[in-house]
Image (cartoon, rainbow, N blue to C red):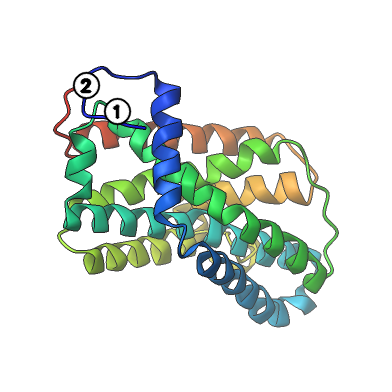
Amino acid sequence: MLSHNRRRHSILIQLFDLWLIQLSNWRWSWRGTIVVDTITPLVGIVAMGVFARDLGREALAYVLTGNMVLGLMFGNLDKVASNFAFMRATGSLGYFATLPVHRTVFVLATLLAFMVLSVPALAVTTIVGSALLNIPLAPSPLLLIVVPLCAIPLAGLGALIGSSVRTPQESGSWSLLMTLILAGMGPVVVPPNRLPGFMLMLGRLSPATYAASALRQTLLGPITSRLWLDLVVLAGLAAVIFALVRIRMTWRQSE
């Protein structure tokens, strides 16, 4: 696949080869990863659904899509951060840096590998969660755009965290802190009418707020003009994060 010769292959070839490499690294543990990624949000849905059932369909919709966001955004954040921290500690990241590949392509390939692993869990969470909460689904084709845009920004942030910390344990601590702050800052799993005003204001700074809004509209309906704001914010944040990856992430290969 990849070699040490200095000729740089096309972006698509780099992406595909690196994606296969990252997938192969998880061939021994993909079953456990999928099981954990499925059970964790379903436990959250069941637990929160007990309290939200008397609050109406809107509250249940926030419980469903909010837990999906926790798995899709913050689950991938933690996995990518841990993966990069492990590669940095073992020297694998330095090895990849010697190859004629773009660092941003390497980060994107890693994200896509983890997204493939998270798709089965996301599908089961959606179907089983909607049945448990008795919420009818109205999926839109725009989900094919929304799901990647939800995962990409924080996965890029995970790459920055993992490539900057000293140990994998430190990476886990930072990932947990980011999850608690960003998920709790706005109407992600809790409807806005149940939150104080200052949290709604802070929620405008959290990508999870826009991801949850986009998922609710494209999964449950109806789609409103707010969706385009959500997509622009998520796409803009992804562009900023990947620009920071290019600037801040240590990479010996000149680009």
Amino acid on which disc 1 is placed: His
> On the picture, is 42 further left or further right than 254?
right
Relative to the observer, which residue lies in front, 218 or 164? 164
Q: Quadrant of the N terminus?
A: top left
Q: Which mark is residue 171?
A: none
User: Where residue 108 appears, x then y in whole percent?
Assistant: 41, 37
Relative to the observer, which residue lies in front, 179 or 200? 179
Mark pair 1, 2: CA separation: 7 Å
User: Where residue 247 appears, x then y in whole percent?
Assistant: 21, 32
> On the picture, is 192 further left or further right than 19?
right
Q: Which residue is mark 2?
A: 255
Q: Which residue is mark 1?
A: 102
Query: In terms of image quadrants, where is residue 68?
Result: bottom right
Residue 141 vertical placement versus 64 (above, below): above
Residue 13 vertical placement versus 114 (above, below): above
Relative to the observer, which residue lies in front, 16 or 64? 16
**Residue at 58% across / 70% down in the picture?**
35
Q: Specify few, some or many for label 1: CA neighbours under 10 Å numbering under 14, 14-19, or 20 or more.
A: many
User: Where residue 155 appears, x then y in whole percent?
Assistant: 41, 48
Residue 247 vertical placement versus 46 (above, below): above
Q: Are marks 1 and 2 in contact (CB under 8 Å)?
A: yes
> Quick one: label 1 or label 2, which is nearer the N terminus?
1
Relative to the observer, which residue lies in front, 185 or 235? 235
**Residue at 41% across / 63% down in the picture?**
179
* Mark 2 secondary-structure assignment: loop
Residue 184 vertical placement versus 53 (above, below): above
Q: Is residue 61 visible?
A: yes
Query: In terms of image quadrants, where is residue 249?
Result: top left
Q: Quadrant of the C terminus?
A: top left
